[in-house]
Amino acid sequence: DIVMTQSPDSLAVSLGERATINCKSSQSVLYSSNNKNSLAWYQQKPGQPPKLLIYWASTRESGVPDRFSGSGSGTDFTLTISSLRAEDVAVYYCHQYYGPLPGTFGQGTKVEIK
Amino acid sequence: EVQLAESGGGLVQPGGSLRLSCAASGFTVSSNYMSWVRQAPGKGLEWVSVIYTGGGTYYADSVKGRFTIAADNSKNTLYLQMNSLRAEDTAVYYCARGTTSNYWLLGLWGQGTLVTVSS
């Protein structure tokens, strides 16, 4: 199975500053039929279920603020929060849906306010 | 309103059984890929089971042979029958729906129900 490894495990960022989370897959998740990376990001706030933020590595789900952006290709991906707000405190998970389906999640990265 | 609501969690002894329910509103369960995802206390997400629109199913190796996923179209409800429960099955269990653009993207989640396996 594809192993997803996120870094760091946690980070503390000042309000208004940039937060960057990395996700590395043990093999490429680039889907050749559509040339898209089968990589999603979820946000889980304390006491809440996860919420889909980004899919195909860089496509924001409807309603997700544009301060959230995803990038990367192949095996290395990044979730960036351009200007951290208090409501962004959460654990963020990457998820590969390349295969074998349903795919695998990363271990999560906790984002806190410095 | 489109939503999912889980129920049926609780405290059960090792070796016992429990059935979780997930009532869907605003859409038809049988027309979607429906999943159960669990989260052990303080841990990450683990995909447990999926039922496809054609009725096929997927189970994680950790629950294969012990858990059964099913959907009742008349009640528009998803179920997870859990047998031979172990301490390591202790978790919040979420039901979730795949998106229309990709079945493996979980765009709608319930609030979860806690299952505790302990003597």
Image (spheres, rainbow, N blue to C red):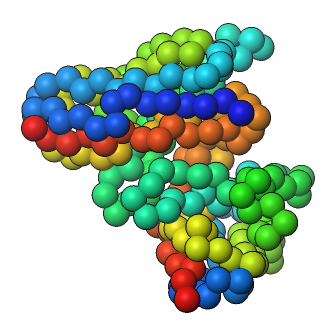
Q: How many numbered callouts?
A: 0
Relative to residue B34, is residue A85 depicted above or below? above
Image side of residue B62 versus residue A19, left or right: right
x then y, percent, for residue B19? 69, 81
In the foreground, A61 or B117: B117
x then y, percent, for residue B53? 83, 53
Q: Residue at x 74, y 11 (%)?
A: A32
Q: Residue at x 68, y 77 (%)?
A: B85
Quadrant hosting residue A1: top right
Residue B21 visible from this viewpoint: no
Residue A73 visible from this viewpoint: yes
In the foreground, B40 or B30: B40
Image side of residue A113 versus residue B104, left or right: left
Figure quadrant of the C terminus of chain A: top left
Q: Residue at x 18, y 36 (%)?
A: A12
x then y, percent, for residue A67? 28, 26
Quadrant hosting residue B23: bottom right
Image side of residue A57 versus residue B72, left or right: left
x then y, percent, for residue A91? 35, 45
Q: Residue at x 52, y 79 (%)?
A: B116
In the foreground, B11 or B88: B88
